[in-house]
Amino acid sequence: MEILTVSHLTKVYGEGEAATRALDDVTFSVEEGEFIAIVGSSGSGKSTLLHLIGGVDRPTSGSVFLNGSDVYARTDEELAVFRRREVGLVYQFYNLVPVLNVVENMTLPVALDGRPVNQGRLDSLLDKLGLRGREGHLPSQLSGGQQQRVAIGRALMNAPALILADEPTGNLDTRNSRDIMQLLRDSNREFGHTVIVITHDEEIALAADRIMAVEDGRIVRDERIR
Amino acid sequence: MNAMGRFTIASLRRNRVRTLVTIAGVALAAALLTAVLTSYTSLTHYLYESEAALSGTWTVAAEAPDSEQFRQQIDEAHDTSEVRGLATVQDVGFAQLTEEQQVRFGKYLPILDVSGEVGEVCAIRSSEGRMPERAGEIMLPESWRDRALANVGDTLTLQVGQRRAVAVSAAEQTAAASGPEVEDELYPNGQYGSVVEYTHPLEDGAILDSTIGYLDSELDGGRFDEELTALRERTYTVVGFYERVNSVLMNGIGPSAVTVGDPEAAGLMCAYVDLTGEANEKALVERAEELFPEATVTSHSTMLRYLGIRGAGYIWDTFFDLAVVLAVVIVAACVSLIYNAFAISVAERTNQFGLLSSVGASRKQLRRAVLLEALLVVCIGIPLGLLAGVGGCAVTFAFIGPMIAAVLGDMGVPFATHVEPWVLAGASALTLVTVLVSAYLPAKRASRLNIIEALRWSQGGQVSKRGVRLAARNTDASKLWKRGIGPGRLLGAGGMLARITKKRGATKGRTAAVSLALAIALLVTAGSLSTLLGRLTEVASSSIDYDLELSVSVTDPDKSTLGALSSEGGREGLMSIYAAAAEVPEVEQVGWALSSFMPAILDDAMVGNALASSRIVDAGRMSDGRCAVDALAYFLEDDAFEAYAREAGVDPADFLDPTHPRAIAVSTVYGNDGERYQVEEMLRGTGSVELYVGGTYDGDPISGFGSQWQAHDGAPNSIDIYAFVVDETGAGVQVDDLSDPLLSLDTMSVEVAALTDSMPPIVHRSKAVQLIMPQALLPAFAHASVPGSSMAGYDVVEGLSSQAAEAVERAAAERVAELGEAEYFPFINDYASMEDSNNVLALIVNVFCLLFTVILALIAMANVFNTVTNSLILRRREFAIMRSIGLSGRQFRRMIASECARFAVIGLVAGLVIATGVSFLIFSAVTQSMVGLNFGLPWNYVALAIGMTALVMVASVAYGMHRCKADNVVEALRMESI
């Protein structure tokens, strides 16, 4: 079943001569449960693509359909709701809220949605992420790998349809990188989450079901390896 | 320029709004300091110039009998470097005046021989003709010319002699008498400086100099009279006149004539010295005493004050206290504004500092970068500020300078902006220091952070230790996001986030709260100042309905009693004078009235609150328990009374029977009850009043009554009434015991038939019980021996009051002359002109308060804008994170609103506390010279302050949020990630 459809997506930054075409008429679709790696050199437009899929930015033209509904037909308010319910974002720099502790950061999307926290889900995530005993820690008291696990926990807390990770291991050592990838892989396998990971690490990319290569805002390669 | 310099400039450019606000803040601070200091120097300069124009530039005067030694000391002093100018004035003698001249100028004409720089040092200058240049020439006061007693070119022959004391009783010849008090200076505007008390060991036959007033044992009660001896005829040529009689020219006897090189000058000599070089009055006087060891040294304290030289025991007066409070407020405001601006700028770039040090910038280089930024801001801000401050003063004084000069007593010196180099230097230096300190402290703090901490700074704000503990506790999923009431519940997740941020954040909102508190405090301070000064000018202004008042008194005490005036014939003269004055075309007579002051005993049923409490009115119980108070009886023209009675709702016909006198009484009194000025009830009912209108003591008529009022704690206040009698020898006798058998009291019962709180147009409010009656009742008072007086009021066409006053005075004087004997003395009160000058004063006060308020408001608002905007912009990344995971715009706004509400409340409370404190200081300063003000916050300004601050806060938040939202989440997230 197709969960994500990206069609003729274009994003232009700046105006006139200074305009840069970060994404240029990108079209593809993703099946539910896929694990996709997007690779490309820096500045190729892969992060822009991810943000557009995640509803963080708005495209210059083109559209994104998630679960059959047009992401950018939504108002800004609806887009915020979309971000907290439908997607889980994981960044290279974790982007945790500094004044919130581990569990608060993880449950923030739930809180923003005004729903009660599912204790069982929180517990199982804490166990899975290896964050037991660190529930009350603030981001500044955690290592990079731990912070990224909190960020993944936050992305998974609402059981979103799609998990988007932008170079989630870019800041981590090999061991932590492998752990993080394993977590993403597990969430894909165990919970059936659709995961899109941006990376330029060939090894990580090879763990994916499908690899898409982006260059100069276009998809230059799209192959299913599993 | 090195890399750090370029980096600094680039960062200033990038944050254009903040840079401009910072420069504006620095400029405002410098401008305000310059303006305050320039106002001060301009005022001081003006007062100095005025005083120099009036009294001369002398700072000390040394007075001694003429001697070779004293003359030598004067010559030596002349060559001393601290002496900027010197003039000597010496008694030549006293010229006998004719009877006619004595009326106007006193007994004698003192003649002074002057030498040295008298024009500059003693302000002795000719207003017509010229100064005397050789012996035999004389300059007289202008009044001689005005009275047509002398003209330039006239030859004046005078009998000049010396004054000699004559003891009244030989037995007391050697007894030392306390000499008359001598004012050491005359001041403009009716201020008086220190009064020096001389004790002259007077002896019979002692020669009196010009410092000693006219001795008349009958008048002053002393033991000496005086006579003019050794009279010699002297002939002078009148060469000029002088206009202003100052302290040098006015001595114990009267205004002096001025001559030079008089060969017979041998009397008391006074050296007026413009002596400088000492920091305080005492040292200056001591230095003068060194120069002139034998002389009596006095100082020109008014001048010294304007020169900034204060006496050792000089109490800070209201003005100085106010200036200090204001200066402190201004400096605090400026420091806070600049400090905040730099603290924010540095905080914002802390991560940049981390980056820079990670690539090898030393701490010194980092600090230098901040200082460079400060210097760049200062280079633009300070010159702008100085220009604005001086320009603002120049524009303001160009408009209101002439008014200030008029209010301060126009000496013909223009009130102009006077810029002193030290003001510019001082304002610049103070601003520079403030900026450097403001820039250096945060820079030092930032450069102390280690690189990793600095880099991490970008991850968002810091968490306090308490925040860490709170975070560690809040891990139970069932309780997560559920706590919190109030804003948290009301504003949803946004509110809860705000609450957590506030609880755990290290500094968030604190600077904003401080700037808000300051804004409230500044505006309320300005309000307190305006309100108090406004109250002062209000109290100073009168509430009289008409423009001119002419009061004519009868000089013969026998003919001025109420009884004498109550007869038709007795007041005929007065009425004809008022009638003559009423014919002056510029005026319209409001009416005229007779009045008389006397004690009144009231029925208990009449005694109102003001009398019972005696807070406003001195009323009390006599020894027999009855309530006594001063009464003021007014006798209006019958027509005027009729109108007044109708207005009061009573039939005027009921008040016309002299065998049963009835009056309308004013029931209220306006005054200060110890807390505030207010109207209080004086009479609470009608009834009968017993008036003490006269009587006799041992056959002599009682000429008046007085009262001795005594306040008691708890017990009712007591009052004792006493009577005055002048016996056949002309001596005054006070009779304290009203039951003295020799005393026969004449009392009269008047029925107060109606009460009203309105005044007839001709009657002023007073603190006496005012009884209004028609003149038709006067026959009932034919036996009254208490003094009566009269006055008339006139309305004048606006702007013509001073001409009209002159015309009325002239008409009255002409009529008085026609009536023959100098039996009447007319006196004019020009209320309209006084009102004008009060209005001018109020205008000046308002202009200053407005400028002060506007500038403080600008500073305060710039500060609020700066802190609030930047506290948001600094957290844009944090906001971007929240938005990227689904914080909606609505939740974002609620979160910010909730946070702002918190620090707004903190700022408001703190601001009101500070404002109350500062207002109280201002209040204390003002109440040093004013009684009866009550302390309170100026609530309208409090409301204005809260309103303005809220408005600016909303604008700042809107701008800050706009900036945070303008860059899209993606950019904000990426921006500070290093």
Image (tube, rainbow, N blue to C red):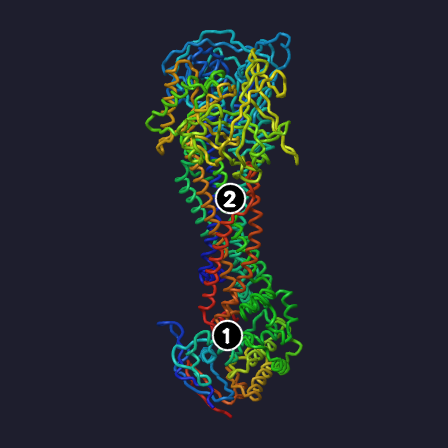
| Marked residue chain, label 2 | B
Taking the image as drawn, is residue B37 in sight?
yes
Badge 1 amino acid = Ser
Q: Which residue is mark 2?
A: B529
Residue B71 image position (x, y, % from top left):
54, 17
Residue B647: x, y in percent? Answer: 42, 36
Q: Quick one: label 1, few (<14), some, or many (20+) residues within 10 Å?
A: many
Q: Could you tell whether B381 is left or right of B698 in the image? A: left
Q: Is residue B586 above or below residue A163?
A: above
Q: Amino acid at mark 2?
A: Leu
The answer to whether residue A165 is left or right of residue A22 is: right
- Which of pointers 2 and 1 lies earlier in the amino acid sequence? 2
Q: Which residue is mark 1?
A: B884
Q: Secondary structure at mark 2?
A: helix
Vertical placement of B517 versus B267: above or below? below
Give the Cα separation between the discs numbered 2 and 1: 51 Å
Q: Which residue is depicted at the point 50% across and 86% down?
A: A36
